[in-house]
Image: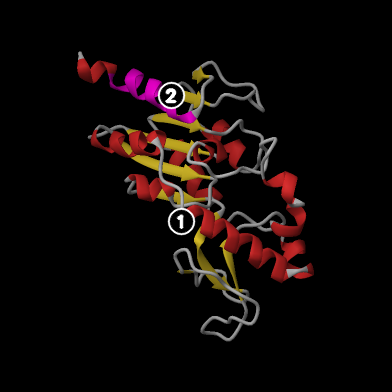
Amino acid sequence: MKKKLVVLTGAGISAESGLKTFRDSDGLWEEYNVMEVASIEGWRKNPGLVLDFYNQRRRQLADVKPNEAHIILAELEEHFDVQIVTQNVDNLHERGGSTKVLHLHGELTKVRSVRDEDGAYDIGYGEISMGQAGEDGAQLRPAIVWFGEAVPLILEAERHVRAADIFAVVGSSLVVYPAAGLATAVRPGTRAFLVDPGDVGMRLPSNFTYIKEPATTGVRKMRDILLEPVRQ
């Protein structure tokens, strides 16, 4: 039986494909007030602005490709039972070949009506506009978990982490909760890795191997460590 490898990914892995993050010095914070475009309050105040913001992000997503880190994580399925838990709303893990991906914060290529939290469906890289309604007649909105909204999949993610034989964090400095709290759900003594070039937002337990590098080179090193026993 394959060992269960659970990988929590953050914005850093997508940034290497060319997707801007909110926290980069030249990132989305510079152009937008996050509370205006990524919060439930912002949606209620100016839904047209929010729709335009996510329409732009979908157009950008259509033009980028998975990077080496995405592809390596998918290739590790040959050796491990790999479960991706991602804070990212893009589809780069799926396009990179991963077959088990849990999106904590929703998916950019999906929409739902404002009345139906569970009725999301895929629109690809298309756009939505004011007045565009779902089957229930209510306005469509991005199927994204915004600031001010609950994260419904966090308990499922925590169950995966608690069951992990190996746990890894890639492209996250563990500062955004509740996702960052998943690192504390790892069973004591479980082999764990953190791959990120930035400073960590919490004190890591001794079972973590810290690879302070960008996702692509860091995941390559992590793969080599994990597969070393296999290659011997």
Q: Nearer the viewer, mark 2 or mark 1?
A: 1
Quadrant for residue 165, please give it. Answer: top left
Residue range (magenta): 215-227
Q: Indicate left or right for 200 with 1 as reference.
A: right
Q: Which mark is residue 62?
A: 1
Residue 153: x percent and y percent? Answer: 53, 53
**Magenta residue check for 169:** no
- 211 or 161: nearer the eye? 211
Q: Indicate left or right for 144 with 40 as reference.
A: left
Q: Which mark is residue 208?
A: none
In this rendering, the answer to whether 224 lies above or below 161 is above
* Prevailing secondary structure class for the magenta stretch in the rendered image: helix
Helix, strand or loop under label 1: helix
- Residue for badge 2: 217
Residue 190 visible to an observer of this rendering: no
- 17 or 132: nearer the eye? 17
> Who's the residue at 55% across and 71% down the image?
112
> Who's the residue at 74% across and 52% down the image?
32
Residue at the farthest front position: 63
Residue 3: x percent and y percent? Answer: 30, 32
Q: Amino acid at mark 2?
A: Thr
Residue 179: x percent and y percent? Answer: 59, 42
Residue at the farthest right position: 45
Mark 1 Cα-neighbour bin, 10 Å: few <14, some 14–19, many ≥20: some
- 128 or 209: nearer the eye? 128
Q: Amino acid at mark 1?
A: Ala
> Who's the residue at 59% across and 59% down the image?
56
Image quadrant holding the N terminus, namely: top left
Q: Indicate left or right for 37 with 213 as reference.
A: right
